Image (cartoon, helix red, strand yellow):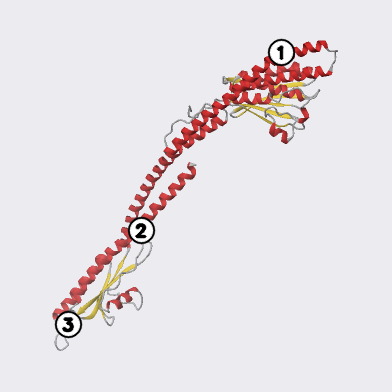
Amino acid sequence: MSTRLLPLLIVLMAAVLLALGVPLGVSVARAEQQKVVIDRIDDTARFAALAQFVTEDAPGGSRRTDTDERLETLQTELTSYYEVYGIKAGVFYRNHIPMANAPTTWFLPQTGEVRDSFDEALLSRRSHDPQQVWPWQDGRLVVASPVIRDGDVVAVVVTESPTDSMASRTLRGWLVIVAGEVAAMLLAVGAALRLTGWVLRPVRVLDATTHDIATGRLKSRVAPAGGPPELRRLAGSFNEMADHVEDVLEQQRAFVADASHQLRNPLSALLLRIELLALELPEGNEEIASVQAEGKRLARVLDDLLDLALAEHSQADLQVTDVGALAAERVAAWSPTAGAKGVRLVGDCPPTTGWADPVTLSSALDAVIDNAVKFTPREQTVRVEVASTGDAATVVVTDNGPGLTDEELARVGDRFWRSGRHQNIKGSGLGLSICRALLAAGDGSISFGHHAPHGLEVTVTVPRTPAAQGEPERP
């Protein structure tokens, strides 16, 4: 969930910062250009004041001495201005002839922005603000101001400024904005991490506890983990529900155990009376033999029910166990039974350690091996193989019996379930259920599969290390 929530928060915050940063960057660029334009306006106004009376002539058409001095002063100012700032500047008569210019090779072009600004200034107003020049553009700023004498425009002052320094200042301003945006983004990411951690911590604890309960650790509960009030209330409600479910399961197990225990005594008395009744009937009476067989079968079912209730209720004494030695011991114990039935029981049990309760694992292996020997025909083989696969130790029991279909494999291990083909074979249908319950108490598992060319393959798995190792302790 955090991998979906965190990118969403980061994208939203990045969009907000971008929405703020882009207009700010545009504003910085425009402010820098406006500052340059205002400086050029002031410069052109000063040059226009110098050029205002340069065009005055003396009576008789001759140029007066003071006029020549003003022209010389204007030319000197323009030349110094160009040499110091690198800005082209010139004063041009209405007929486009230069009054003074710097450099002296710079003239009015026939077209372009300079000519447009000159023509606009001839209308007795300053040229319009130039278009925005961005740092990546190779543009120039043109400003033109009219020279007015006696209400008439007699000349125009034009300046053409390079934008290199303005672009450098704009880029520095943008760099500051980017640095601020990056710092803000880092702070936003940190805040998003804290926020998602605070919101999702109760969810993670709830998920871990749910997994523990689903795998059989019914005592697990959700510990207080902070977070929003809604999630804290959810954790409290979950704990109440888990307590209620555990109570119901305990009542169910207690009922099964008590019922099995209480039924055994009347059933034993009933079987004894049947035995006494059989003594009074002719030997070989089929009806009484059938009643005795059903009574003994019911006794076995009650014993298995009691074993199942105890297996589901008991706490496993987990410890480091030599699974290979334990499996070899069970193979040796079942070999006489298999030999009496004409079945070969073969074990390949190298030393392999696992984390299990030796008693419950022995009981589970007994149930699996008993089942394999029971359904294997004479002269066939049952194999018990021990191996380690990374984090788990496995005991694989294979037989050459009739096996199960895919539908039957999906149901094997269910309580009281038996294949329709095996109804005549002794059993209650609880053996593998008891095996699964015993293994689940110690974090183990059992699985079933086909064995080629025919038969059943049962795999008993136990962890090699404690389930809680490397994980945070949970209540």
| Kind of residue at disc 2 | Pro
* Residue 108 seen by the camera: yes
Q: State the image coordinates of residue 117 (x, y, percent, origin top left).
A: 31, 75
| Kind of residue at disc 3 | Glu
Q: Relative to 21, does residue 297 appear above or below in the rendering? A: above
Label 3: state its secondary structure.
Answer: loop
Sequence-wise first label, 1 or 3: 3
C-beta proximity under 8 Å, tags 1 and 2: no
Which label is found at residue 280? none
Q: CA distance from mark 3 to mark 2?
A: 51 Å
Q: State the image coordinates of residue 322 (x, y, percent, origin top left).
A: 61, 20
Neighbor class of circle 1 (other Cα within 10 Å; few <14, some 14-19, many 20+) is few
Q: Is residue 141 left or right of residue 269?
A: left
Quadrant of residue 112 within the rendered picture: bottom left
Residue occupied by mark 1: 269
Label 2: state its secondary structure.
Answer: helix
Sequence-wise first label, 3 or 2: 2
Q: Is residue 265 left or right of residue 15?
A: right
Residue occupied by mark 3: 56
Q: Is residue 239 left or right of residue 444?
A: left
Residue name at image x 48 percent, y 42 percent: 2
Sequence-wise first label, 1 or 2: 2
Q: Nearer the viewer, mark 1 or mark 3?
A: 1
| Kind of residue at disc 1 | Ala
Q: CA distance from mark 1 to mark 2?
A: 95 Å
Residue occupied by mark 2: 23
Q: Nearer the viewer, mark 3 or mark 2?
A: 2
